[in-house]
Image (cartoon, helix red, strand yellow):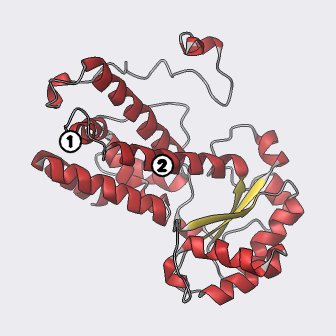
């Protein structure tokens, strides 16, 4: 923990210290929760942890491509190594983007059945047919007719992360041939999205925990975190369509977007597992306090309208 006492001495270009423009993170309101037996230090630490996790999740997915970009692939390997993906990445260094590796991921849809996907995956990767069947079953139960049990239905599966642009380009095009939702992106971005999805699962699990016999403490702290304004970082990247949306919105210049607003905004960039996780988190928040339900409804209407 001593490394974090002076983060400016232990940061790097890809993991910089906190932005000086960020407001202080000491905004926790002890009166917001009813838990007199729980130390204030613990509640404050939980609050700050939720802030860090939610801010990271938003920062990662606000530059991710929307679903209508799945299947859009570079014209050739030269484009892959130069201009491809520069609008939907958090990797600032263009030279590193050109080096790879690249991740090929497919997403669940309702147009392809299991045998079709397994056959194409085996043909594209050369992997064993049974292994391909297991990978396909991770996508979605809707595509399977022979499932006995599914441990984890994800909605997205990273098929391969090759260092060779030729292999990545060929593999992605094999799935594009049968119109499967596929993305070809730098592994840096795919990995960050996987980490953000894991953090989303973690904070949702924490909100189901009881603290000193109180089943709602963690959820109420999470509600406060989501209701607060998102940190404005000049260095944060944002997808072009979101940038246009925020610029063209009537109240974009005056409205300060909360973290919950941003969670609604990035919702369509989440795959099935992450979307189900956020729905579980929202459902928990709405059941613990009626004010949470009202605020979530107002936030949703404001974002969607």
Residue at figure coordinates x 59%, y 76% from the top left = 137
Front-most of 153 and 170?
Answer: 153
Binning the other alpha carbons within 10 Å of mark 1 as few (below 14), some (14 to 19) or many (20 upward) gives many
Quarter residue 166 falls in? bottom right
Residue 20 appears in the figure: yes
Residues at marks 1 and 2, CA–CA distance in whole angstroms: 36 Å
Binning the other alpha carbons within 10 Å of mark 2 as few (below 14), some (14 to 19) or many (20 upward) gives few
Where disc 2 sits, the SS reads helix
Residue at figure coordinates x 38%, y 47% from the top left = 205
Residue 299 appears in the figure: no
Residue 142 rendering spot, x and y as whole percentages? 49, 82
Question: Is 169 above or below relative to 220?
Answer: below
Where disc 1 sits, the SS reads loop
Front-most of 277 and 100?
Answer: 277
Give the residue at mark 1: 216
Locate residue 154 relative to residue 200 in the image: left or right.
right
Locate residue 31 relative to residue 227 in the image: left or right.
left
Locate residue 21 relative to residue 164 in the image: left or right.
left
Residue 9 rendering spot, x and y as whole percentages? 64, 11
Quarter residue 54 falls in? top left
């Amino acid at each position: 923990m001593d490394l974090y006492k002076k983060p400016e001495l232990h940061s790097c270009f890809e993991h910089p210290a906190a932005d000086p423009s960020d407001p202080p993170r000491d905004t926790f309101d002890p009166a917001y929760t009813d838990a007199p037996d729980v130390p204030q230090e613990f509640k404050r630490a939980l609050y700050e942890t939720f802030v860090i996790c939610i801010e990271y999740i938003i920062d990662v997915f606000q530059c991710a491509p929307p679903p209508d970009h799945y299947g859009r692939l570079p014209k050739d390997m030269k484009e892959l190594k130069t201009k491809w993906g520069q609008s939907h990445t958090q990797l600032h260094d263009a030279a590193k983007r050109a080096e790879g590796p690249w991740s090929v991921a497919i997403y669940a849809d309702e147009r392809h059945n299991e045998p079709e996907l397994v056959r194409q995956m085996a043909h594209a990767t050369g992997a064993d047919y049974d292994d391909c069947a297991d990978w396909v079953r991770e996508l979605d139960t809707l595509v399977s007719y022979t499932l006995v049990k599914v441990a984890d239905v994800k909605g997205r599966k990273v098929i391969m992360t090759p260092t060779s642009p030729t292999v990545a380009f060929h593999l992605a095009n094999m799935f594009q041939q049968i119109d499967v939702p596929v993305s070809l992106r730098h592994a840096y971005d795919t990995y960050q999205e996987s980490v953000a999805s894991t953090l989303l699962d973690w904070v949702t699990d924490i909100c189901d925990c009881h603290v000193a016999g109180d089943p709602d403490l963690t959820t109420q702290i999470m509600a406060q975190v989501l209701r607060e304004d998102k940190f404005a970082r000049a260095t944060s990247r944002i997808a072009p369509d979101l940038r246009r949306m925020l610029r063209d919105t009537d109240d974009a210049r005056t409205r300060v977007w909360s973290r919950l607003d941003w969670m609604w905004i990035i919702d369509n960039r989440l795959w099935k597992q992450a979307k189900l996780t956020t729905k579980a988190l929202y459902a928990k928040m709405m059941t613990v306090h009626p004010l949470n339900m009202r605020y979530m409804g107002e936030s949703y209407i404001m974002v969607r309208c």
